[in-house]
Image (cartoon, rainbow, N blue to C red):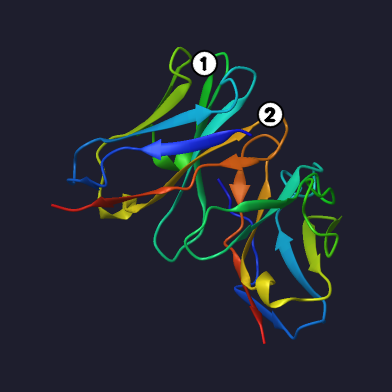
């Protein structure tokens, strides 16, 4: 059974870079697509971007290139960096998995990141 | 990037059926059969309930069904149960991923 677990700081200062890691267990990080999806408190889901098993990436244009997603196959992990954060970036951040042309089927439990000074 | 449009809330009594709509465009919902639905209970991660418009993952109750007409997809829950009370999100995942704004289901 594949499991995903997010980790990283729960508090980030405005204008700094938010960094999170998703550790995948119970399966290989190869042959899948890996995504970050966030949810501000009390609001809906926002897809941020994905990285493929081959390292190709695509991010939500609304995030204006603030998003960087990377893959570490040796550790079975992938990571998110979101630069120049503001209070609007406060959210629960989820990592998720999909196959090509398939929905995001496995999700982590989510981690709350608060942007505040 | 456009979000998909869902009603903010729906409600129904135990045993009844409800339907949640999800309206997109011909570039997403209408153009492909890559529509999924998620159920989210408070404090929990979303759970995949329907994929490719009408398919259920293993373990999902057959009380949940999906369909599509034109640019609008539908999630129907029959035989409503108290445990169905949750937020429901539709998603289009063809060329990119779009989510609907979510619908809060209240079981009266």
Q: Residue at x 66, y 50 (%)?
A: B91
For residue A72, above or below residue A58? above
Q: What x and y, as percent, mark residue A82?
A: 33, 36
Q: Badges 2 and 1: C-beta atoms under 8 Å apart?
A: no
For residue B42, above or below residue A60? below
What chain does mark 2 sit on? A
Q: Residues within 10 Å of mark 2 (few under 14, many from 20)?
A: some
Q: Nearer the viewer, mark 2 or mark 1?
A: 2
B46 to the left or right of B49? left
A36 to the left or right of B93? left
Q: Residue at x 18, y 53 (%)?
A: A116
Dot 2: element: loop
What chain does mark 1 sit on? A
Q: Which mark is residue A99?
A: 2
Q: Which mark is residue A55?
A: 1
Frontmost residue, B7 versus A97: A97
Q: What x and y, as percent, mark residue B82?
A: 68, 77
- Asked whether the residues under marks 2 and 1 belong to the same chain, the reply is yes
Q: Which mark is residue A14?
A: none
A104 to the left or right of A71? right
Image quadrant where residue A7 sits: top left
Dot 1: element: loop
Frontmost residue, A33 versus B96: A33
């Amino acid at each position: 059974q594949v499991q995903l677990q997010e980790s990283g700081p729960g508090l980030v200062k405005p204008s700094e870079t938010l960094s999170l890691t998703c550790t995948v267990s119970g399966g290989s990080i190869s042959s899948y697509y890996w995504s970050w999806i966030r949810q501000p408190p009390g609001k809906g889901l926002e897809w941020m971007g994905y990285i493929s098993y081959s390292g190709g990436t695509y991010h939500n244009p609304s995030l204006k290139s603030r998003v960087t997603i990377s893959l570490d196959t040796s550790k079975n992990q992938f990571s998110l960096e979101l630069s120049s954060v503001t209070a609007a970036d406060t959210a629960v951040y989820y990592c998720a998995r999909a196959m090509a042309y398939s929905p995001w089927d496995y999700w982590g439990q989510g981690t709350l990141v608060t942007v505040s000074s | 990037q456009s979000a998909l449009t869902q009603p903010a809330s729906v409600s129904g009594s135990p045993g009844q059926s409800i339907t949640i709509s999800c309206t997109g465009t011909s570039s997403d919902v209408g153009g492909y059969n890559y529509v999924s639905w998620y159920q989210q209970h408070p404090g929990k991660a979303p759970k995949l309930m329907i994929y490719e418009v009408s398919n259920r993952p293993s373990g999902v109750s057959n009380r949940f069904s999906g369909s599509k007409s034109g640019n609008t997809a539908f999630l129907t829950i029959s035989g409503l149960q108290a445990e169905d009370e949750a937020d429901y999100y539709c998603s289009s995942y063809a060329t990119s991923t779009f989510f609907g704004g979510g619908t809060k289901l209240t079981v009266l």
